Image: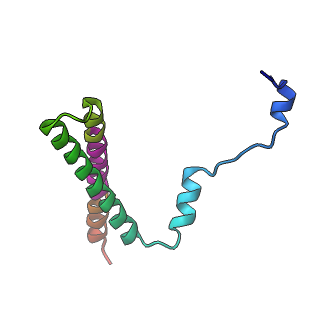
Amino acid sequence: MNILPIGAVSAAAPTTVDPFWQTTMQSSSTTSFTQILADKLEHLDHTVQAADKAVASFALNGNIPPHRVMMALEEASGEMQMMVQIRSHLIDGYQEIMRMQL
């Protein structure tokens, strides 16, 4: 086994990964808010459908492990909670705009 000294390891070219917010901001700069919201709603729908399929598969023939079912349900629950929060913030913003006097 060939073990490299510390100096040789640190001399290697560093690999950089763009942070999530940079790649999101760059890709969504030309996308409208409506399109982003529609994409997130579609993702939520797919997540909920996947959780439903996992539950049905587990209940009918048990060929899916219980921990996978729980993971799918928790993912769907988290997505739903996030969308409810987004909805609440949008409604609050709309109501604040409606209260403004011109």
Total tally of numbered discs in the picture: 0
Q: Residue at x 77, y 21 (%)?
A: 1
**Range of the magenta residues?**
74-87
Q: Position of residue 79 (x, y in %)?
A: 31, 48
- Considering depth in this image, is 69 or 20 the residue closer to the camera? 69
Q: Position of residue 99 (x, y in %)?
A: 26, 68
The secondary structure that most of the magenta stretch takes on is: helix
The reply, left or right, for residue 12 in relation to residue 22 is right
- Considering depth in this image, is 94 or 59 the residue closer to the camera? 59
The reply, left or right, for residue 16 in relation to residue 53 is right
Which residue lies most toward the bottom here?
A: 102
Asked if residue 75 lies in the magenta stretch, the reply is yes
Q: Residue at x 29, y 55 (%)?
A: 46
**Picture layout, residue 66 above or below residue 20:** above
Question: On the rendered image, what quadrant is the C terminus found in?
Answer: bottom left
**Picture layout, residue 19 above or below residue 65:** below
Q: Quadrant of residue 56?
A: top left
**Picture layout, residue 76 above or below residue 45:** above
